[in-house]
Amino acid sequence: MARRAGIGRRTTGAGAPASVSATDAARGFGRLVDHVREQHVEYVVERGGVAVARIGPASERRCTLRDFVALLRSRSPANESYLREVEAASESANRPAVPRSPWERSSTRAS
């Protein structure tokens, strides 16, 4: 979001985040946040020419279900012994716990 939108200015470095004055950021905060969300860009907020904050996407990388399926298809299948171990661990961890009977006598009995 360059000056034409009323917020920020580009720094000279390639790929460097745009800088925006604290005043401009406050005046156009909604537009600034929309631009960050839609374009996945980062801004450096400056006060008196000194960087004081960054505003950028909350997550660096987004992954969709389609991306996940493509990742799984790109990998070689797991070997059978590994799958058996995972299945055994899953069964063990998901086995329902049966509470002890409250009427059962304990092995330590007062005499």
Image: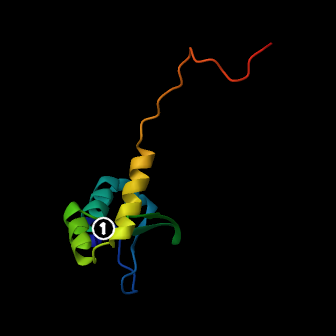
Position of 53 with respect to 17 (left or right) is right
What is the residue that sits farthest to the left in this orientation?
66
What is the residue that sits farthest to the right in this orientation?
111
For mark 1, give the secondary structure: loop
Q: Position of residue 101 (x, y in %)?
A: 53, 20
Position of 51 with respect to 31 (left or right) is right
**On the rendered image, what quadrant is the C terminus found in?**
top right
- The residue shown at (40%, 80%) is 16
**On the rendered image, what quadrant is the N terminus found in?**
bottom left
Q: Is residue 28 above or below residue 109?
A: below
Q: Is residue 24 above or below residue 106?
A: below
Q: Quadrant of residue 69?
A: bottom left
Q: Position of residue 79 (x, y in %)?
A: 33, 73
Q: Position of residue 93 (x, y in %)?
A: 45, 47
Q: Position of residue 46 (x, y in %)?
A: 48, 67
Position of 54 with respect to 5 (left or right) is right
Give amino acid for label 1: His
Q: Quadrant of residue 36?
A: bottom left
- The residue shown at (35%, 54%) is 27
- The residue shown at (39%, 64%) is 56
**Applied colour scheme:** rainbow
